[in-house]
Amino acid sequence: MGKPNIKTIGVLTSGGDAPGMNAALRAVARTAWARGIDVKGIYRGYSGLLNDEIFDMEKEFTCDIISRGGTALFTARCEEFKQLEYQEKAAEILRSHNIDGLVVIGGDGSFRGAQKLSAQGINTVALPGTIDLDIACTEYTIGFDTAVNTAMQAIDKIRDSSTSHERCSIIEVMGRNAGYIALWCGMATGAEDILIPESFDGNLPKVEQQIIEHLLRNRAKGKTHHMVINAEGVGHSYSMAKRIESATGIETRATILGHMQRGGSPTAKDRVYASMMGAYAVDLLCAGKTNRVVGYQNGRFMDMDIDEGLAMTKDIDEYQLQIAHLLGK
Ligand code: ADP
Ligand code: F6P
């Protein structure tokens, strides 16, 4: 691998926003400046890149953002970027701005874009920014910790109301196809039932029957609430609530937490890990690396080839799932 003398680094955020993205982009910029490298910000992910929404980043842009959720660079999804001609165009635009290193902060979809830009000769490093924790090559993704804490606090509040009314509550959390947010929230709030896509066989009536039996057993023992954490994609929470209520006669309400899980001030963990990853990305580019993804494994920040990272698969921790169920019995 050659060792290019990087002079200008570009940075963009792509896909769903995640708390901590600001800390990451701030660290990219400030580490680059400390290494004598100029920084260009790219607004609105690959969409902004294709529209040439590129600006010279100044120190001021990175001030007072570490504590803010969202992303100061805005973010977007861009279908056309999946086509080769747009990837070629993007690489041309980057070259026209003399950007010789690019940091992409986003989820695994965004990694594929980074991979394609690498193939176009742009030195590219990707950082895992997603609340879903659904990236196989890393045990940590920017935003997950904050999202879980945000959801946990909301669920605690719903539980107060649920207990007061002696109701059953179904709370739907995000995660796309992954159940990490649901599993963590379920365990952290002592939920009675946790539904995640990884262990859902598609048989919703069976799952609902199990909840109904569990709810009735608990009621017979005098338990005054019943919290069900439902990962998005496992049944429709409002209709599940209606069916459970009519089968048990116990008032049941559904709450979909939605995008509030993506917002809010990042936790210390998200600020610190995102900062470390941002700095790491710049140092990889300075070392002449490209097509790399930064991750966190076995207590250390590390990097690997994006192709290798994207080829990996990740399973839910079966033991954690078993214990979460056991503790909610
Ligand atoms: P995330 O990055 O959070 O997983 P998406 O899956 O929506 O979010 O991907 C974000 C963006 O990454 C997409 O809108 C698209 O611009 C780009 N992208 C996704 N898949 C590819 C691909 N196969 N090739 C090129 N770019 C892609
Ligand atoms: O990937 C983050 C995420 O919030 C998922 O948990 C969710 O499925 C999806 O994005 C929602 O996307 P949108 O912001 O387009 O509604």
Image: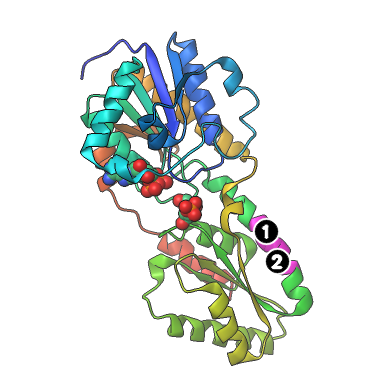
The magenta stretch spans which residues?
152-160
Residue occupying image coordinates x 60% and y 90%: 246
Q: Which mark is residue 105?
A: none
Which residue does the numbered mark 2 point to in the structure image? 158
Q: From mark 1 to mark 2, how far is it between C-alphas? A: 6 Å
Residue occupying image coordinates x 52% and y 47%: 144
Three-letter residue code for mark 1: Ala
Q: Is residue 290 visible?
A: no
Horizontal side of residue 98 vs 180, given as left or right: left
- Regarding mark 1 in the picture, which secondary structure is present there? helix
Horizontal side of residue 297 vs 222, given as left or right: left
Which residue does the numbered mark 1 point to in the structure image? 154
Give neighbour class at mark 1: few <14, some 14-19, many 20+ (Cα, 10 Å): some
In contact (CB < 8 Å): disc 1 and disc 2 = yes
* Quarter containing the C terminus: bottom right
Instruction: Give whichever of 117, 216 is nearer the camera.
Output: 117
Residue occupying image coordinates x 64% and y 84%: 218
Of all residues shown, which one is farthest toward the right? Answer: 164
Against 73, residue 329 (above or below) is below
Horizontal side of residue 23 vs 164, given as left or right: left
Three-letter residue code for mark 2: Ile
Q: Position of residue 20 (x, y in %)?
A: 55, 37
Quarter location, residue 116: top left
